[in-house]
C-alpha cells in the first residue's frame, strides 16, 4: 500500500476463500467485474478520494487498480481570517440588545439595518430614467465619472484640471485603485521604496507585497500623547532615500483618526519637495473628517498648488456608502498634459 502515495497504484489481493463458491452462489464469482467504485481510503492521517477498479480472476486473485485524485492546488494554504470581519461575526452571534458593531464601517439605521443615502437613491433613479446602455467602457473607465471624481478631489476650477495635467483611471474602490498605483510603481519606478505610516490600514502592506514593491514605515502615532508623532514623522521622511514614495492618508487617518494640521501639512510638503519624494495620497474618507468635502481635500490641494507631482487613490465605499459597487479611482497629477496623456 506504500505505493498509494503516488498518483496511482496497483494492488493484488489473494483470497483463498474464493477458490470454492459458497452455497447458493453461481460459482462464477471469479468472472465478475466491479468498475468505477468510489471510496475513501485513509493513508496515514490524510484521507484521499480514490477511484477503484476491481476484477476477480479465475485464480482466486483480486486485482485492484487505485487512482488517487491529487489536486494541482494542494499547495494552496487557507488564508488567515479577516480580523475586522471576525468582529462582525462576533456581533451577529451576540444576543445582547445593546450590542454595537464596531467592525466594518458602514452606514446603519437606528435599528442597525443597512442605510442607503438619499442622494444615492436619487442618482440611481436618474440612471434608470436615462436608459443608459451597458456597453464596454474605455480602458480608463467612464469618462463622466473620471471628470467628476477629479473635480471633487481638486475643485472644478483647479488649474491642473484646466491644463489637463491630471490623469484619472476608474478603479475597484480604494483597494483596486491602490493596486493600480502599486502596479504602476513596480513597472515604471522599480526598486523605489514606499514609506507607510506606523500604523496604517492593513491592506497597504498586502497590496505593496503582492505588487512586488518594497516598503518601510515612518513614525506616526505617539502612544504617550495619543496623538501625532510629528517630529518622528518628519525625521523619518527626511532620512528616507531621495526620491522615495511617501504614502499619506488625505484625511481621517486609518486606523488612528489623527490628522496633521494645515500648518503641519505645509511642513510635510516642504520636506517631500526638498527630498524629491513622490507623495501618494490615499483618500478613502473625503467628507468624513470635517463634514466638508472641500476641507477634507485640502491636504491634497495644498500639495498640488505647490506644483508637486503625486498619486491619489480615491474610494466612494465610505462617504457615499457604495460598498457593493466598488467605486474608486487612481489619479496622477503630473507636470504637463503631454505626460498625463501617456498614463
Image: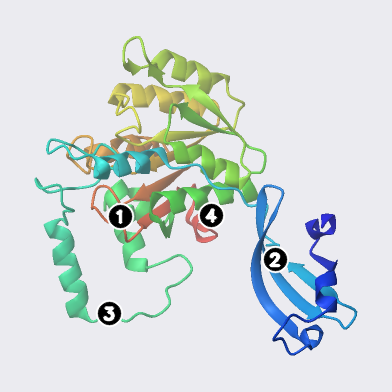
- Whether pointer 2 and pointer 1 mark residues with C-beta atoms closer than 8 Å, the reply is no
Nearer to the camera, 81 or 305: 81
SS at mark 1?
Answer: loop
Residue density around tag 1, few if under 14, some if 14–19, many if 20 or more, within 10 Å:
some
Identify the residue under disc 3.
132
Work out whether 196 lies above or below 183. above
Nearer to the camera, 83 or 134: 83
Residue 100 spot, x, y in % from top left: 19, 37
Q: Residue at x 32, y 24 (%)?
A: 260
Residue ranking furthest to the right: 59
The CA span between labels 3 and 4 is 32 Å
Point out which mark residue 69 bears. Answer: 2
Residue 53 spot, x, y in % from top left: 75, 76
Work out whether residue 232 can be spotted: yes
Residue density around tag 4, few if under 14, some if 14–19, many if 20 or more, within 10 Å:
some
Residue ranking furthest to the left: 110
> In the rendered structure, which disc, 3 or 4, sits on the residue that comes first in sequence?
3
Identify the residue under disc 1.
323
> In the rendered structure, which disc, 4 or 2, sits on the residue that comes first in sequence?
2
Residue 101 spot, x, y in % from top left: 23, 39
Work out whether 19 lies above or below 324. below
Identify the residue under disc 4.
339
Residue ranking furthest to the top: 224
The CA span between labels 2 and 3 is 49 Å
The CA span between labels 4 and 1 is 33 Å
Q: Residue at x 70, y 66 (%)?
A: 69
SS at mark 2?
Answer: loop
Work out whether 32 lies above or below 159. below
Q: Nearer the viewer, mark 2 or mark 1?
A: 2
Amino acid at each position: 500500500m506504500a505505493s498509494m502515495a503516488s498518483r496511482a497504484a496497483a494492488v493484488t489481493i489473494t483470497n483463498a476463500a474464493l477458490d470454492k463458491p459458497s452455497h447458493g452462489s453461481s460459482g462464477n464469482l471469479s468472472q465478475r467485474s466491479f468498475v468505477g467504485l468510489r471510496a475513501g481510503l485513509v493513508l496515514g492521517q490524510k484521507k484521499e478520494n480514490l477511484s477503484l477498479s476491481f476484477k476477480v480472476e479465475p485464480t482466486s486473485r483480486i486485482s485492484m487498480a487505485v487512482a488517487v485524485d491529487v489536486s494541482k492546488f494542494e499547495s494552496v494554504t487557507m488564508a488567515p481570517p479577516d480580523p475586522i470581519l471576525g468582529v462582525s461575526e462576533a456581533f451577529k452571534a451576540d444576543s445582547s440588545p445593546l450590542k454595537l458593531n464596531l467592525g466594518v464601517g458602514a452606514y446603519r439605521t437606528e435599528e442597525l439595518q443597512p442605510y442607503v443615502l438619499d442622494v444615492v437613491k436619487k442618482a440611481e433613479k436618474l440612471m434608470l430614467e436615462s436608459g443608459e446602455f451597458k456597453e464596454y467602457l474605455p480602458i480608463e473607465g467612464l469618462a463622466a465619472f473620471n471628470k467628476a471624481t477629479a473635480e471633487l478631489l481638486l475643485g472644478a476650477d483647479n488649474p491642473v484640471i484646466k491644463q489637463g495635467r491630471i490623469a484619472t483611471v476608474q478603479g475597484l474602490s480604494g483597494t483596486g485603485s491602490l493596486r493600480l498605483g502599486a502596479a504602476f510603481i513596480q513597472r515604471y519606478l522599480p526598486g523605489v521604496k514606499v514609506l507607510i505610516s506606523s500604523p496604517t490600514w492593513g491592506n497597504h502592506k498586502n497590496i505593496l507585497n503582492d505588487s512586488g514593491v518594497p516598503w518601510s514605515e515612518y513614525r506616526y502615532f505617539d502612544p504617550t500623547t495619543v496623538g501625532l508623532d510629528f517630529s518622528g514623522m518628519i525625521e523619518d521622511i527626511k532620512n528616507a532615500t531621495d526620491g522615495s514614495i511617501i504614502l499619506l492618508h488625505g484625511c481621517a487617518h486609518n486606523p488612528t483618526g489623527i490628522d496633521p494640521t494645515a500648518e503641519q501639512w505645509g511642513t510635510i510638503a516642504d520636506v517631500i519637495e526638498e527630498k524629491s519624494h513622490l507623495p501618494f495620497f490615499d483618500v478613502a474618507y473625503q467628507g468624513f473628517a470635517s463634514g466638508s468635502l472641500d476641507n477634507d481635500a485640502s491636504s491634497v490641494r495644498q500639495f498640488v498648488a505647490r506644483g508637486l507631482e503625486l498619486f491619489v487613490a480615491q474610494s466612494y465605499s465610505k462617504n457615499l456608502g457604495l460598498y457593493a459597487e466598488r467605486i474608486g479611482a487612481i489619479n496622477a497629477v503630473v507636470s504637463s498634459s503631454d505626460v498625463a496623456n501617456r498614463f
